[in-house]
Amino acid sequence: MIKKIYLIGNPNVGKSVVFSRLTGVTVISSNYPGTTVEIAKGYLCLNNEKVEVVDLPGTYSLDPTSRAEEAAVSLLKEFSKEEIVVVNIIDSTNLERNLLLTLQLIEEGFPVVICMNMCDDAGHRGVHINIVKLEELLKVPVISTCALTGKGIKLLIERIKEAVSSPRGKFTHQERWLEIGRIIEQVQWLEHRHHTFREIMEDASVRPVTGLLMAGGIIYAAFKITRFIGEGIISHITDPFFINIYQPILEKFSSFWPEKGFWFHLLIGDLINGKIDFKQSLGVLTTAPYIEFGMVLPYVVSFYFILSLLEDVGYLPRLAVLLDNLLHRLGLHGYAVIPVLLGFGCNVPGILSTRVLESKRERFIACTIISIGVPCVPLQAMIFGLLGKFGGFYVSGVYLVLFSLMIILGIILSRFLSGYSPEFLLEIPPYRFPPLFMLWKKLYFRIKGFLIEAMPVVLLGVCFINILLYFKLFDFVTAIFAPILHGLFGLPKEAVVALTVGFLRKDVAMGMLMPLGLTANQLFICATLLAISFPCVASFVVLAKELGLKGLIKSILIMVGISIIVGAVLHFVILR
């Protein structure tokens, strides 16, 4: 009786997609390492029995050289070999390299089924493999699949029960490669063909000069498209809904309470010129949903769409390789680009994904850099919304300051923190256009996760601030910090409330700056301070979990110190 099915293979061979096809559990799959470092589990109905499927971390060999490979090997030994099936997933475009792990699995006597994934891409590259002959030589079932389209998955499930243990005498390392060479000669042949335009672009995107030019163009285009889509959604969907449909309902609903009463203030907020103003009223039923759905969500949708597209097309691992030399100077390596890019969506998954980094030193540097220099999508949405009307100079200025801080802080931490940065090994997949249904599926789950996480915090945050404002408790805080805020940063005392709210939710804090009538320069300073100062409460909790108390305190002290220095410098340079 099969108790567990283990999926094992080299990094970036499509294990997460195969896992999703087998179990129905949606796992975000990307064309870069990092997404399967944590073990994913699901269930497959096999012969009317519920069997657990485990997606092991990517590994090149059963001789572990990293934590991921150690985890994979140890999990394989959890059950006796009679109770498990090992599905070895192979990249059909790189059979020779993948067969090393395959031979080791067979030698150890594991019941193995070979899943030859990416068969479509192999055909496009002129790589032809005789599946029948390969099965004959390996003496285990071999199935050709394309997990993205689902081709071959049904046959793979049917043949899992045919998995057999075919142990061989252990080869030396040299004998294994000789055996691999003999297998390749018998089962694989290549068709001569010229480089396609896609392959030319693949090469150009990782070379220093052309790669940096392409990266600059792609990143610029990504943010332009993000803003174009976001503003389109706001002007054609969210604003008409809130103004033409939602506002009349609220006005009728609010007529049940006196305007100066507590419940009116809490739910509706302040009336501006006798009317509800979704940007300024600051009510739980007015400003809170408008900021989340009317201003932030459109940019979240557009940003995640572009990020998902870049992931699945295969550009992100090339960006990681391109930035590896730079990141090494910051005490990190190219893998760190993954947490950083995830942090641009939300700092929480960005900080969590620093687990892919090998050392505590790297994780501390990455977590601190993300918390200080990487604004999340909601904050970016508000930066675009508030500063964009003053011109691209102010928006790009915020990112320039943050990028400079990341570089400077990374260099300083790299010099003063003890530890090491391991070498960078990364599989680069071919460029391919993903199926739209996979793209939309990923987008749906990311948006769903964002709403589940963000909406309660926004509602509770606005509710909490409203109570403090109603009972005038913020006046005490304002009186204490107003002189510092005005003298050091050049900001009015009313900005204290917004900056304080930033601990709960930074996009809400930016939204509260709108009715204060700040100048473009003051908004620029506020946006920068919100980005680099104390993290939002969700990031704070995750940061404490990942770094521990000692690491958390060090990181917070760094954030506070940098916030004071940067705010003062910007005030001196811009406002004077």
Image (cartoon, rainbow, N blue to C red):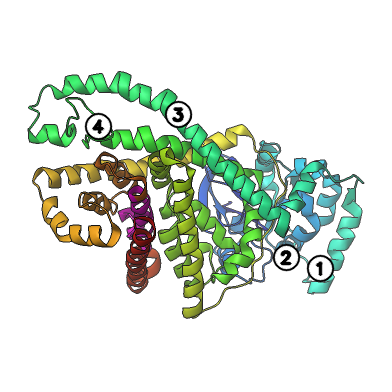
Q: What residue is drawn where x is 40% and y is 43%? A: 387
Residue indicated by mark 2: 104
2 or 4: mark nearer the eye? 4
> Could you tell whether 257 is left or right of 162 in the image?
left
Residues tagged 2 and 1 counted as in contact (Cβ below 8 A): yes
1 or 3: mark nearer the eye? 3
Amino acid type at circle 2 is Gln
Amino acid type at circle 3 is Ile
Q: CA distance from mark 1 to mark 4?
A: 67 Å
Amino acid type at circle 4 is Thr
Label of residue 176 in the image:
1
Q: CA distance from mark 3 to mark 2?
A: 53 Å
Res 23 seen here: no
Residue indicated by mark 4: 286
**What SS does tag 2 mark?**
helix
Residue indicated by mark 3: 233
Picture quarter containing residue 128? top right
**In this rendering, is residue 558 above or below 502?**
below
**What SS does tag 1 mark?**
helix
1 or 4: mark nearer the eye? 4
Per the rendered image, the range of residues in magenta is 522-544
Q: Tell me, yes or no, whether the highlighted magenta stretch contains residue 542.
A: yes
Label 3 Cα neighbours within 10 Å, binned few <14 / some 14-19 / many ≥20: some
Label 1 Cα neighbours within 10 Å, binned few <14 / some 14-19 / many ≥20: some
3 or 2: mark nearer the eye? 3
> Could you tell whether 114 is left or right of 372 in the image?
right
Task: First in sequence, mark 1 or 4: give its number.
Answer: 1
Picture quarter containing residue 576? bottom left
The main secondary structure of the magenta stretch is helix
Task: First in sequence, mark 2 or 4: give its number.
Answer: 2
Task: First in sequence, mark 1 or 3: give its number.
Answer: 1
